[in-house]
Amino acid sequence: MSDELFPKERGAEILGELSAWTSVADVMVAARILEARTVPGDEPQSLLVMPLEHAEPAFEQIFVILLGYLMNGYVVPSQKVAVCRALDPQITKATGTALQALRFRPTVRVGRAPERHDKRVFFIQDQPAGIELIRAPLNCLMGLYLDKYEYAKSLRDVVVEAEKKTGGRPTIFHRPHADARLPSFIEAACFYALGLEVGTRFASPGQATLDFAYRAVNVQTLPPVAPAVLGTAFEAGQRMLDALR
């Protein structure tokens, strides 16, 4: 991945948003695991198995890159640790501190799972408390990634087919103007890794003009433009924002 387009610190910050998917219930289980006082229903495990839905090497490679960003960005939400301590007074201050300091540092390998019809899978191994905390964020990441990968792959296939038929490659580029930064980043990573373009054709020199606001409305015009046209565009944008509320 290009450090210019995908700086590591920025990637960790964005993928770190998945930390929010760690639930209060997961934090409480992790706390009990750390304190060695699990209850019936807790199932401490040091291994998480994630099936690979596509056989292409690129699918595996891109996910490993995204996983690296998540490893560097994941933290246990402090608000949820506080809620857990309020709900369960047995959780000590030291355990709360340990949870905040816990980082996702797994051992990852790829293999086949006989019980899953010999399907290729990721074997993700970490301390049991870490696996408990990261399970939901990882499932969310895989769901987002699978959607964005299949979309990018369909466009890559269009380019390949066009080249076969015409000898030319149409330029398809990613413009993250109308989505939250997490799905935009994942989609851009898929575009880049699959050989599509990343960027915008409407940027001013020296400016990225990438709007990471959630469902932002961007209007690109060249003067002169009729005021009525701008008014219609702004009204349409306002309707979109009202619908979100």
Image: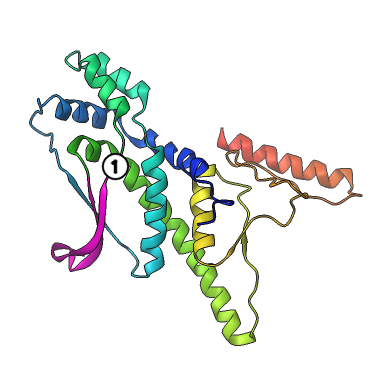
Q: Is the stretch drawn in magenta largely helix, strand or loop? A: strand
Name the quadrant of the C terminus.
Answer: top right
Task: Answer whether residue 54 is magenta in the image.
Answer: no
Residue displayed at 36% across by 46% down: 140
Residue displayed at 33% across by 70% down: 55
Vertical relation: 97 (above or below) 43 = above
Residue displayed at 42% across by 46% down: 69
Q: Residue furthest right?
A: 224
Of the pair 176 and 225, the residue shown nearer to us: 176
Tell me where the magenta segment starts and ends, as one range: 105-125
On the rendered structure, is 70 left or right of 198?
Answer: left
Q: Residue furthest front?
A: 3
Q: Which residue is mark 1?
A: 105
Residue displayed at 58% across by 74% down: 159
Vertical relation: 102 (above or below) 217 = above
Vertical relation: 117 (above or below) 94 = below
